Amino acid sequence: MGDYLLRQALESEARKITDLIHSVGINPTGLDWRRFIVAVDSSGEVLGCGQIKSHGREIRELASIAVRPEWRGRGIARSVIDKLLESAQKPLYLMCMANMGGMYEKFGFLPVTRADLPKYFQRIYALFRTAGVFMQPHDDLLIMKLE
Ligand SMILES: CC(C)(COP(=O)(O)OP(=O)(O)OC[C@H]1O[C@@H](n2cnc3c(N)ncnc32)[C@H](O)[C@@H]1OP(=O)(O)O)[C@@H](O)C(=O)NCCC(=O)NCCS
């Protein structure tokens, strides 16, 4: 597994998690430390993280998967995701940019068509499309599901 440990986040790590998420530029909302798994090095630095968010009773979302640039390519995201999936209720959704779909397919996630999206994700998708006028044509949002 390398020189890091995987565990539940501590309250004292809330700021480090927020800083990591901001630094990698992914969705900065809903970063409650209680839901997070972190990968930490021997000095306690947070190297990577991830969480499962709930939206109402029905919808769960794998989110906030991030690894510090200098620690990428060593399986940290894979370990964090595997750990989160161990106890996750299914179905489990996620949102990512289309070019990240290949990574999540390795864990069994499959793209969901617009017609099959739960209402929560239909709203997000519509918001994304509205904001999308400011984005590049290849920046498309992908919503995936693990049964
Ligand atoms: C994406 C990210 C989390 C990957 O972290 P990582 O620790 O380097 O990933 P891992 O080394 O655990 O790789 C896990 C698997 O995903 C694959 N993978 C990693 N990054 C990938 C990418 N950008 N696209 C496609 N596959 C990718 C790896 O090849 C690996 O596959 P394998 O286990 O079959 O060899 C990291 O690059 C990051 O923090 N990026 C910025 C934030 C981000 O985009 N998060 C995802 C939001 S949806």
Image (cartoon, rainbow, N blue to C red):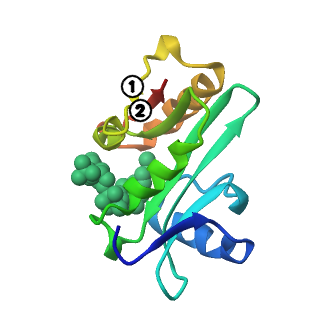
Left or right of 2 on screen, residue 141:
right
- Circle nearer the N terminus (2, 1): 1
Residue closer to the observer: 84 or 132: 84
Tell me if 129 is positioned left or right of 33 in this view: left
Against 137, is 123 above or below? above
Q: Which residue is mark 1?
A: 111
Q: Tag on residue 63?
A: none
For the point 41% across and 32% down, the residue is 142
Q: Quadrant of ligand 1?
A: bottom left
Residue occupying the point 49% across, 11% down:
115
Residue drawn at x 42%, y 57% is 79
Where residue 1 appears, x then y in whole percent?
A: 35, 67
Q: Position of residue 17 (x, y in %)?
A: 59, 68
Measured along the vertical axis of the image, is residue 74 above or below residue 114? below
Q: For residue 126, what is the image quadrant?
A: top right
Left of 147 or right of it: where is 13? right
Q: Amino acid at mark 2?
A: Leu
Marks 2/1: CA distance?
7 Å
**Marks 2 and 1 close (CB-CB < 8 Å):** yes
Q: Can you tell which of label 2 and label 1 is closer to the viewer?
A: 1
- Under mark 1, the amino acid is Pro
Q: Secondary structure at mark 1?
A: strand
